[in-house]
Image (cartoon, rainbow, N blue to C red):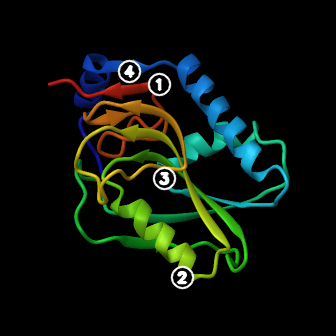
Amino acid sequence: MSLDREHLLRVRDSARQLYDMAQIDAAVTRVADAMTARYNDSNPLLLTVMNGGVVFAGRLLTELSFPLEIDYLHATRYTGETSGNDEIQWIVTPGINLAGRDVVILDDILDVGTTLLAIVEACKAQGAASVATAVLVDKVHDRKAQPGLKADFTGVEAEDAYLFGCGMDYKGFWRNAPGIYAVEG
């Protein structure tokens, strides 16, 4: 998708920063500590949800001091749009056999949770011994796919706004923004 560069710069410049990188790093460390407490004696498979989960995964992996394998998947409800549709699109499925494995799904954000729930169910259907979820951001609102839906590991909570940065995008751009930002206006 191609957007006018000036528009993209205006979006970035007018956005409100919710978390800076020091706060993100502290949140990632908390997630790593909690994951280490749970998985220190096992060899889990960490599945990164592309494209959004790549920044979170990259920051998290180096803080985990237990043996693990990594793989990725690409499933989405957002195809360059600002809101999801009801149909999950499977673009890439994991290449590693999930049967009998402890699986942790890494993603950028838990918004409604429809995509994350579909991924969890797909992992269970492939015979995973256990499936947990870890997200950098839990967006706080009452539109979750299931009442009270939470990730097993959460870095930070954020308001119900259009967010970008640290893996989250604005129409395909600004995943690289250093921090978490809310679009204004």
- Residue 46, quarter of the rendered image: bottom right
The mark nearer the N terminus, 2 or 3, is 3
Q: Is residue 61 left or right of residue 42?
A: left
Inter-mark Cα distance, 2 to 3: 23 Å
Asked if residue 130 is positioned above or below residue 2 in the image, the reply reads below
Residue 18, numbered label: 4
Is the residue under label 1 in contact with that under label 4 (CB below 8 Å)? yes
Residue located at (25% from left, 57% from top): 84
Indicate the amino acid at tag 1.
Answer: Gly
Inter-mark Cα distance, 4 to 3: 21 Å
Say whether residue 165 is visible. Answer: no
Is the residue under label 3 in contact with that under label 1 (CB below 8 Å)? no
Q: Which residue is mark 2?
A: 125
Q: Which residue is mark 3?
A: 51
Asked if residue 6 is positioned above or below residue 14 in the image, the reply reads below
Inter-mark Cα distance, 4 to 2: 37 Å
Indicate the amino acid at tag 2.
Answer: Ala
Indicate the amino acid at tag 3.
Answer: Asn
Q: Which residue is mark 1?
A: 179
Q: Secondary structure at mark 4?
A: strand
Q: Is residue 115 left or right of residue 9?
A: right
